[in-house]
Amino acid sequence: MTNVFAQGPGTNRVASIFQNQLTLVESDVVSLAEAMPAEKYDFKPTAGEFAGVRTFGEQVKHVATMIYMTSAIVLEEKSPYGPGTNDNGPDDVKGKDAIVAYLKASIAYARKAMGSLTEQNALDPLKTYFGSQPRAEVASGLTYHSYDHYGQMVVYARMNGIVPPASRR
């Protein structure tokens, strides 16, 4: 990862910081989504306190949908995809290939949003579901929310004998 503070003049350091965070999300979440076999995308734990949880595929779709929606707030535009059923995005996105493509497309859209952040606009207030928040705070939500669900996806993968790529030596 590049040290944004060591870069020369003219570098958008704020955008670089958020792009670096997005790169981490992309690396970990996409690689795990690709590592889980297609036949396990409908898996969800049933033993213990797992009533009503999302399937693995729904976890991936939810992450992608929230990436789209968060990025749209940062850009102050309408999201290409609404929350959909249970905040899991479009109902017609089904199967591993379509879900992974949807996730990758959400990250491409997020690149545009993270690239729009500057020292001048990072603290601008934006309207969100949670009230007014600075643009940089909204942008940071993309990372922490993605990793919340990544943690759940890791549990699902390990329950199915899959070691997450980020944990492999």
Image (cartoon, rainbow, N blue to C red):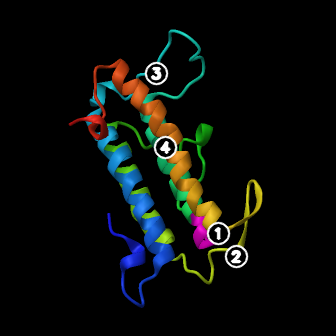
Q: Earlier in the sequence, mark 3 or mark 2?
A: 3
Query: What residue do we see at 59% from left, 14% from top?
Result: 49
**Between tags 3 and 2, which lies in front?**
2
In the rendered image, which quarter contains the N terminus? bottom left
| Image disc number at residue 147 | 4
The crowding category of the residue bearing disc 1, from other C-alpha atoms within 10 Å (few below 14, some 14 to 19, many at least 20), is: many
Q: Is residue 96 above or below residue 30?
A: above
| 69 relative position to 125: left or right | left
The crowding category of the residue bearing disc 3, from other C-alpha atoms within 10 Å (few below 14, some 14 to 19, many at least 20), is: many
Q: Position of residue 79 (x, y in %)?
A: 57, 62
Q: Earlier in the sequence, mark 1 or mark 4?
A: 1
Residue at numbered disc 3: 44
Query: Quadrant location of residue 134?
Result: bottom right
Q: Which residues are magenta?
A: 72-78
Give the distance between the C-alpha atoms of the residues marked 1 and 4, in whole angstroms.
20 Å
Which amino acid lies under the numbered mark 3 shown in the image of this protein? Lys
**Between tags 3 and 1, which lies in front?**
1
Task: Assign a secondary structure to mark 3.
Answer: loop
| Image disc number at residue 124 | 2
Which amino acid lies under the numbered mark 4 shown in the image of this protein? Tyr
Q: Is residue 46 above or below residue 165?
A: above
Proximity of marks 1 and 4: CB atoms separated by less than 8 Å: no
Residue at numbered disc 1: 135
Proximity of marks 4 and 3: CB atoms separated by less than 8 Å: no
Proximity of marks 3 and 1: CB atoms separated by less than 8 Å: no
